[in-house]
Image: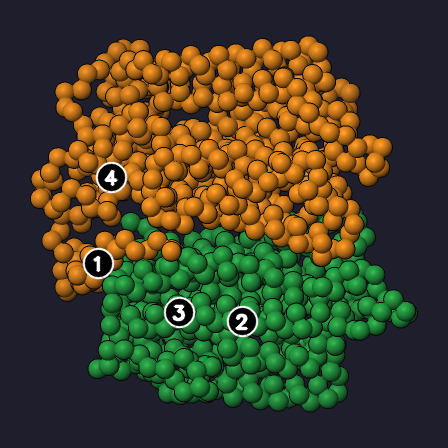
Chain colours: A orange, B green
């Protein structure tokens, strides 16, 4: 579909405001004086018109990666998981590292959509749709690893407690089974939450559809949405309830993943800080992935007025915060290993930092603790090239964190005769690269077919959506009408507060 | 009308570092009440502590342990308040502005707490097993190889230095946040909100590190063999809960018994405070469960022994009571929307949760001293005595300044804040 109007893609090319109140109000989440219809147009058209050439190129590359993954997984099934580098003493190699890596990335979306919703962070609306989609795809990528790591993938349904004639049940005492429940319930609730949020936007696409079948299909998925008052009321209630239900899941998934390690008595794994520290690490890597993807998406699809530098800056602050929490947890673990007086714990940590995998440990420390500190500078956390580079560095660091945890604690068993050095095989590398192919294939399909920004929600946080927006002053209630009249704040002070740029911690 | 704030004299500085600014308070935010508001709790506190001193003479062990629990109760609550204040500044929270002053009055607590903590120094030998010199002498029958390995950290001079550093950091951060906000009442300098945020930003990491290590030094090292990496988070989670409960309770006291701040703090604000109470009740349970479950599952003796002490000889009742009364009942009470908006329910719950926070710390500390559970009368007199003095200080600060940060640029938004449109 061709658009008749050229929409501003960047705050710098905004038309002058009709009210003449200046184009760039830093308080506004949506820049560029866009109207409600402009937002519909700006987002919907990408799901309606033919994809640009760049999309096809990216899709081709990603799809080849996904095919590589499928081919290599077939190879793994055919030959057995020995073609991965897993062996004695490192029985958990890259597959588990990759599982934790991907499931960690899959934390940002539901955190943005549920927890930030409960905290009334309106800026979430511009990024929650894409972040949630990314979450779902990351969880899909995560689930591949344990599924194939069991070796006999055709028996994977044995992990589910299904009554059977063999009277055989999974081991309920194993955290690996808790993982099955934790990750699958997270996947189901995240998908449901994403879909509920999509309904009003799918209805918008349906109403814009020019083609019979397109309209029918979208009508099916938009569940008869008409945008009536009652629909909105039910929708808001459902959204709040789902947000409440999804919030504990955001914390539980990675807590349960951390139990996989922490319930064992292996030095370096068995430590009580693991659940909250894994959750912080997951949010850290998830936000980094959202920043990586959003920086590209807003550029290519001209969404800079919706996903502004302010949005990215807020995510970078969360990256700084969670990175520091993770870094402090590393230091706490190290201190407590010494303080415990347990020689095995002490050795495990000395070995991590100075043993044969010291290189991985210091990559982890640098990428997760040190480089994110650059975000203390307001200039750096608002710079697109810096944040793009750092967001990738963070995910490199977080992959190495899982590598360090998994490999270094296993490679030197209690007896020196069972010491070894883990080396990845070409199949390890190929499947890991392939999982990125799958991830980007799914994400590109999302960008092509689904409104990538939650249009209805973005409109809802614009000042124009406030019923009192056009009132001259105060909260719209006249003095003496029974409602409390509240005079507007001192204008000069409020203005100064809004415009201050000096909140960068120096 | 003064356009700046003046420093108090030295002794008063401990309780309130600046002179009264109530002269500039707008009528709706002025504390109108007499000095009984702070004098009564303080006098009660002093009386209870005086009674406790009789106990010191009778049974020093019981006194010092009870005193440590009561003192930690106040320390964690003040630290929780400091975290909550920093968090609200950093996120530019609007809803909380009307209760910020109560929180600010809570966090200017560290000089007084340092003073109140001095008696503990006379009980170091009772409280902290690691202060015994024989443990480190290989020739002694009490020689302890494990503790000898920790000596570089667990020794009295270094412990005292660390305490000094912690209190310096906490006092400095709370001084900045408290006085900047008071200065804003007098003259709304547009630089102040940014200064509050920047203090909060650099303060947060310092606060996190000092709080974690303080938890090891003050509480975890009462059982010097035991260790847990999550202990600092546990210490924080209870304190944050205590702080939100204190803010809620003080707001309700000012409104219900003082008749102040009518229409300023509304059910909308209690609703949000209730959500935070709910959140911290769950967070505490999550952290406590993580600590317990991982050690129970691993079953390594040097780790499980701490819980073993707390699951036998009557302490099992305390442990069970924590699950039910610190988590389950508050969780169910705070789940519905109506209870969070009902002042009376919130008042009862705040008192309840503060009691449970003390009960939790009692459960952490006392099994070190006593084989069997239950309470000693000193546990209550020390706790309530210290709390009386602390509460008197809090009310004294509130009585001398406007009850809300009246110059805060977001006060307008906070006043008309609503949860549901």
Tell me whether the residue at label 1 lies in contact with that at label 2, contact meaning CB atoms closer than 8 angstroms.
no
Q: Is residue B289 above or below residue A13?
A: below
Q: Which mark is residue A496?
A: 1
Q: How many marks?
A: 4
Tell me whether the residue at label 4 lies in contact with that at label 2, contact meaning CB atoms closer than 8 angstroms.
no
Give the distance between the C-alpha atoms of the residues marked 1 and 2, in whole angstroms: 34 Å
Q: Quick one: B4 or B410, which is closer to the camera?
A: B4
The answer to which of marks 4 and 1 sits earlier in the sequence is 4
Q: Is residue A478 visible?
A: yes
Residue B397 image position (x, y, % from top left): 40, 79
Chain at tag 2: B
The residue identified by callout 2 is: B167
Residue B396 image position (x, y, % from top left): 42, 82
Q: Which mark is residue B69?
A: none
Whether callout 3 and callout 2 share a subunit is answered: yes
The residue identified by callout 3 is: B176
């Amino acid at each position: 579909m061709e658009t008749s109007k050229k929409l501003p893609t960047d705050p710098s090319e905004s038309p002058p405001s009709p009210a003449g109140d200046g184009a760039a109000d830093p308080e506004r989440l949506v820049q560029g004086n866009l109207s409600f219809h402009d937002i519909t147009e700006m987002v919907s058209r990408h799901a309606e018109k033919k994809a640009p050439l760049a999309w096809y190129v990216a899709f081709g590359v990603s799809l080849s990666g996904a095919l590589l993954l499928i081919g290599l997984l077939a190879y793994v099934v055919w030959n057995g998981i020995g073609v991965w580098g897993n062996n004695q003493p490192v029985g958990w190699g890259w597959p588990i590292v990759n599982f934790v890596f991907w499931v960690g990335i899959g934390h940002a979306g539901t955190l943005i959509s549920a927890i930030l919703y409960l905290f009334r962070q309106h800026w979430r609306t511009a990024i929650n749709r894409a972040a949630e989609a990314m979450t779902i795809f990351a969880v899909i990528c995560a689930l591949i690893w344990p599924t194939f790591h069991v070796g006999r993938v055709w028996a994977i349904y044995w992990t589910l407690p299904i009554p059977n004639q063999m009277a055989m049940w999974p081991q309920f005492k194993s955290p690996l089974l808790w993982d099955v429940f934790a990750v699958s319930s997270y996947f189901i609730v995240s998908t449901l939450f994403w879909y509920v949020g999509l309904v009003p936007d799918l209805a918008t696409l349906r109403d814009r559809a020019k083609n019979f079948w397109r309209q029918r299909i979208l009508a099916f998925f938009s569940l008869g949405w008409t945008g009536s008052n009652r629909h909105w009321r039910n929708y808001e209630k459902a959204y709040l309830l789902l947000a409440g239900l999804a919030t504990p899941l955001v914390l539980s998934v990675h807590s349960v993943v951390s139990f996989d390690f922490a319930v064992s008595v292996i030095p370096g794994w068995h430590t009580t800080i693991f659940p909250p520290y894994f959750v912080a690490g997951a949010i850290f890597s998830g936000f980094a992935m959202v920043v990586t993807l959003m920086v590209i998406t807003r550029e290519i699809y001209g969404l800079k007025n919706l996903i502004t530098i302010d949005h990215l800056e807020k995510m970078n602050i969360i990256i700084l915060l969670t990175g520091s929490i993770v870094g402090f947890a590393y230091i706490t673990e190290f201190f407590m290993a010494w303080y415990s007086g347990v020689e095995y714990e002490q050795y495990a940590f000395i070995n991590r930092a100075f043993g044969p995998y010291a290189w991985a440990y210091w990559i982890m420390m640098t990428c997760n603790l040190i480089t994110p500190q650059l975000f203390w500078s307001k200039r750096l956390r608002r710079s697109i090239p810096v944040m793009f580079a750092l967001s990738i560095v963070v995910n490199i660091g977080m992959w190495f964190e899982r590598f360090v945890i998994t490999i270094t604690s296993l490679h030197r068993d209690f007896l020196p005769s069972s010491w070894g050095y883990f080396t990845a095989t070409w199949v390890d590398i190929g499947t890991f690269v392939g999982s990125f192919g799958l991830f980007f294939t799914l994400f590109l399909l999302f960008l092509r077919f689904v409104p990538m920004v939650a249009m209805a929600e973005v409109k809802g946080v614009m000042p124009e959506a406030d019923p009192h927006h056009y009132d001259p002053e105060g909260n719209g209630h006249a003095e003496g009408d029974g409602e409390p009249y509240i005079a507007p704040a001192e204008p000069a002070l409020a203005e100064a507060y809004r415009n201050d740029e000096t909140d960068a911690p120096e | 009308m003064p356009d700046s704030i003046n420093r108090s004299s030295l002794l008063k500085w401990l309780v309130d570092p600046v002179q009264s600014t109530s002269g500039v308070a707008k009528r709706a935010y002025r504390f109108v009440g007499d000095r009984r508001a702070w004098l009564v709790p303080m006098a009660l506190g002093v009386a209870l502590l005086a009674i406790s001193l009789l106990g010191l003479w009778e049974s020093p062990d019981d006194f010092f342990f009870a005193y440590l629990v009561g003192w930690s109760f106040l320390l964690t609550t003040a630290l929780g308040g400091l975290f909550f204040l920093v968090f609200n500044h950093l996120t530019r929270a609007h809803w909380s502005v009307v209760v910020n002053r109560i929180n600010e009055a809570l966090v200017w607590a560290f000089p007084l707490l340092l003073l109140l903590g001095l008696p503990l120094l006379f009980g170091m030998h009772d409280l902290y097993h690691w202060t015994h010199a024989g443990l480190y002498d290989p020739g002694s029958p009490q020689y302890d190889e494990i503790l000898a390995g920790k000596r570089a950290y667990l020794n009295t001079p270094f412990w005292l230095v660390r305490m000094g550093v912690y209190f310096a950091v906490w006092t400095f951060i709370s001084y900045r946040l408290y006085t900047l906000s008071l200065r804003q009442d007098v003259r709304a300098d547009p630089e102040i909100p940014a200064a509050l945020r920047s203090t909060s930003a650099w303060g947060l990491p310092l606060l996190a590190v000092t709080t974690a290590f303080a938890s090891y030094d003050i509480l975890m090292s009462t059982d010097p063999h035991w260790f847990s990496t999550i202990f600092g988070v546990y210490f924080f989670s209870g304190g944050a809960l205590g702080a939100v409960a204190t803010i809620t309770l003080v707001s309700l006291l000012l409104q219900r018994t003082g008749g102040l701040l009518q229409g300023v703090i509304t059910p909308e604000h209690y609703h949000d405070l209730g959500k935070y109470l709910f959140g911290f009740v769950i967070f505490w349970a999550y952290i406590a469960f993580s600590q317990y479950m991982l050690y129970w599952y691993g079953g390594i003796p040097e780790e499980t022994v701490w819980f073993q002490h707390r699951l036998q000889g009557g302490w099992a009742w305390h442990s069970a009571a924590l699950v039910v009364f610190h988590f389950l009942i508050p969780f169910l009470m705070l789940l519905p929307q109506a209870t969070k908006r009902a002042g009376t329910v919130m008042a009862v719950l705040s008192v309840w949760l503060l009691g449970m926070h003390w009960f939790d710390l009692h459960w952490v500390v006392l099994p070190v001293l006593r084989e069997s559970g239950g309470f000693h009368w000193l546990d209550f007199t020390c706790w309530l005595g210290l709390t009386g003095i602390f509460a008197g200080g809090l009310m004294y600060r509130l009585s001398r300044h406007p009850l809300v940060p009246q110059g805060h640029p977001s006060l307008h938004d906070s006043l008309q804040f609503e949860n549901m449109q």
